[in-house]
Amino acid sequence: MTEGYFIAGEWGSTFMRLHLCRSTAAGCAIVASAQGVGVAGCTDFEAAFFATAQPWFDSHGPLPVILAGMVGGNIGWRDSGYAACPVASHAVAPLRFTARGIDIAITPGLSCRNMFNLPDVVRGEEMAMFGWLDSQTRSADERHVLCLPGRHVKWVTTTGAQVESFFTGMNGELEDILLRHSLLGRGVIQTQVVNEADFATGLDLMFNDRSLAMGHALFATRSRLVLGEHPPETAASFLSGLLIGGDIRDALTAYQARGGLPAPIVVLGESDLAARYIHAIKTFGCDAVQATTPHLAIQGLARLFTATQRSDA
């Protein structure tokens, strides 16, 4: 085994991203990366994992592995359960087992009763939360709100180095469902490019009229298309603006109703979607900053891996 090397992976529903990592004095360096099939399309997890990682074992020997994401869910390789909030990264205990002589650890997700007193869960994104929380020393009373944009956006409250609670918005999945399976998507041409003008129109509708309910706003995607107020190529951008604007409006309202927001909101992610969330949050009059530390989830996994290695020593 090559000393100091290990494999860290994000294995979600739609993708597997594995990283060959090397422990350094500064933290974790990514040496190489590889992709494989996601959990939703996987029928043999052991075979899928080794099909992707085997070249690294051939080169470096039996490296230890740490994985996060839906691979630890009840439809994954092993069910690693959920750690209850509030919780810090050092208190998370991965599920460990051996496959083909390789030591594998799968991190648990997190569970909580959120601010609405509803049960909520997260699996995979918590590593980015911990990666950011552990990136510097934080005082015990330091509070933040984190936003993790994505298919299921997470709004997270942290205190010190702990994740206190979170709630989940489904606007990414709702957009996909509405465009693929509802009248709103009929005649819409989906492209990879966001039309900023129509996105802003949808966003501004949710900002300018706080009485406009999402259920009433959504049909405008169809009516504007029929009446020629946006073309088929930009209708999806308008819908995205509505959904993101509604998600942010509702989240900010919920926080403000419970004592306000510790500013600024920290948006985790390096994608164009994260940049749109920052712009949208600022549109609603709240400051937002983008976390700049690269590969936050892998940094979180690396710190957890290091902690488990020390506990074994």
Image: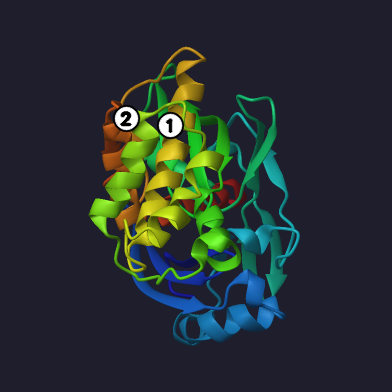
Q: Please name whichever residue, 188 or 266, is drawn nearer the observer in this view of the structure.
A: 188
Name which quarter of the figure residue 295 lies in: bottom left
Q: Is residue 283 above or below residue 234?
A: above
Q: Is residue 271 visible?
A: no
How far is the residue under mark 2 from the one under mark 1? 7 Å
Query: Which amino acid type is shown beneath numbered disc 2?
Result: Phe
Q: Please name whichever residue, 51 or 205, is drawn nearer the observer in this view of the structure.
A: 205
Q: Give the numbered dot on residue 162.
A: none
Residue positioned most to the front: 227
Q: Residues within 10 Å of mark 1 (few under 14, many from 20)?
A: some
Residue positioned most to the top: 259
**Position of 20 compared to 72: left or right?**
left
Closer to the N terminus: mark 2 or mark 1?
1
**What SS does tag 2 mark?**
loop
Q: Are marks 2 and 1 in contact (CB under 8 Å)?
A: yes
Say which residue label 2 marks. 284
Q: Is residue 17 visible?
A: yes
Say which residue label 1 marks. 249
**What SS does tag 1 mark?**
helix
Q: Residues within 10 Å of mark 2 (few under 14, many from 20)?
A: some
Residue shown at 28%/26% (left/top)? 285
Residue shown at 68%/76% (left/top)? 45
Residue shown at 40%/66% (left/top)? 21
**Position of 176 compared to 149: left or right?**
right
Q: Is residue 236 above or below residue 148?
A: below
Residue 104 x %, y %: 63, 65
Q: Is residue 17 above or below residue 229?
A: below
Residue 211 x %, y %: 47, 26
Residue 85 x %, y %: 63, 32
Name which quarter of the figure residue 139 lies in: top left
